[in-house]
Image (cartoon, grey):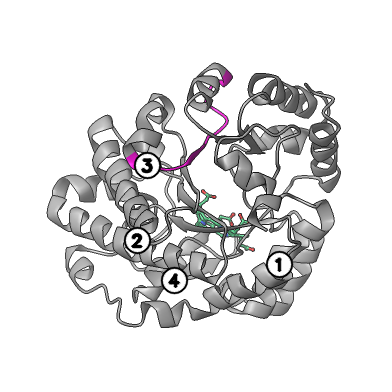
Amino acid sequence: MANSRVMLDVLRGETVFPPPIWMMRQAGRYLPEYRELRKKAGSFLDLCYNPDFAVEVTLQPIRRFGFDASILFSDILVVPHALGRDLRFEEGRGPVMTPIGARGVEQLDGQAFHDRLASVYETVRRLRAELPESTTLIGFCGAPWTIATYMIAGHGTPDQAPARLFAYREPQAMKKLLATLADYSAAYLIRQIEAGADVVQIFDSWSGVLDEVCFDAFCVKPVAEIVRKVRTAHPGVPIIGFPKGAGSLYSDYRRQTGVTALGLDWTVPLTQAQALQAQGAIQGNLDPLRLVAGGAALREGVDAILRALGSGPLVFNLGHGITPETPIAHVEAMIRQIRDGSGR
Ligand code: CP3
């Protein structure tokens, strides 16, 4: 019944209008039902690792908005966590880890990797059983570079200076870290697919801070390795690459990595997006703050995307995750505008 999932047709290159819609971070703090469950679950990681909670939270935006795709509720940092690194999420600060050094890279321990992620696979299995037949289920992982930035700094930073410096000072350790993460991330995606994910997305949220040599070595090569392994195991499953902030380096990314579809952030000009769409499906790329503002800013943003990209293979999405202050009424207005087709 896979062909009843329109998003899969689009990812394989068909044009569907109105385009399928989902939003990055569509389960989250802008939803009152999420905030309610989050209080009950305790920590954010408890929410991720408890299939009862994780399934419920994943389904919340599907019930409310009827999106065409559902993304597994988890976090990209469960991968280093399953490799033995500590991880916690602090209110208002985000993820906190003990910074890794060259020795720590040697000591990464994947012995219990899949056991530690068993609850995530269970969540995927239950989701595929509970989701409407027509809803595409997206599994995901972080790209090695983005995961490495959090492992090296121990927290988020605006420009990833700690990870960039580490890469220059400890090139061998950096290489090893990225290779290890690529191996385990591929294994993680393969298990998600075997548990029922129809598509997988690789989030490289921090690829925009690198020069072209580092972009090639830290973003393109490790993602290409993940794609190669996932393809070998499951040739038919579409893979979405999202190298946020890649700018002009987006142009060769699909060919270099082998991803099926390209996730575009909102800084990608629509003319560049059209050129990328001539090579295959694209996903994006509304500025999430247009959705916060609503009104004309939202209408014009949606309209511009539909006009420029609506006659090719497009998955409508934001250019990055929805922010917690987004009014629900604005999400509803965006969906109405896209599904009415009035923007074309
Ligand atoms: O998209 C979805 O609905 C699926 C769930 C999802 C989350 N994180 C849930 C989450 C996905 C796909 C992610 C990916 C993720 N996590 C990325 C890549 C995408 C991106 O946004 O750039 C990154 C860099 C992370 C790491 C991470 N997790 C950070 C930096 C933070 C703190 C920032 C924040 O928004 O609080 C998180 C926490 C997080 N991940 C939350 C959610 C819903 C908020 C946690 C809470 O409820 O307090």
- Report the amino acid beneath label 4: Leu
Report how far apart the C-alphas of labels 3 and 2 lie in the structure: 26 Å
Crowd band around label 4 with a 10 angstrom C-alpha radius: few (<14), some (14–19), many (20+): some
The residue to which callout 2 is attached is 151
- Report the amino acid beneath label 2: Met
169 inside magenta stretch: no
Task: Indicate whether 258 appears above or below 105.
Answer: above
Q: Is tag 3's residue or tag 2's residue first in the polypeptide sequence?
A: 2
Give the extent of the magenta segment.
257-270
Report how far apart the C-alphas of labels 2 and 1 lie in the structure: 26 Å
Residue 135, given in percent of the width and then of the height, sits at: 71, 56
Badge 3 element: loop
The residue to which callout 4 is attached is 87
Q: At 74% across and 38% down in the image, what residue appears?
A: 292
Find residue 306 and report its image quarter: top right
Q: Is mark 4 within 8 Å of ligand 1?
A: no
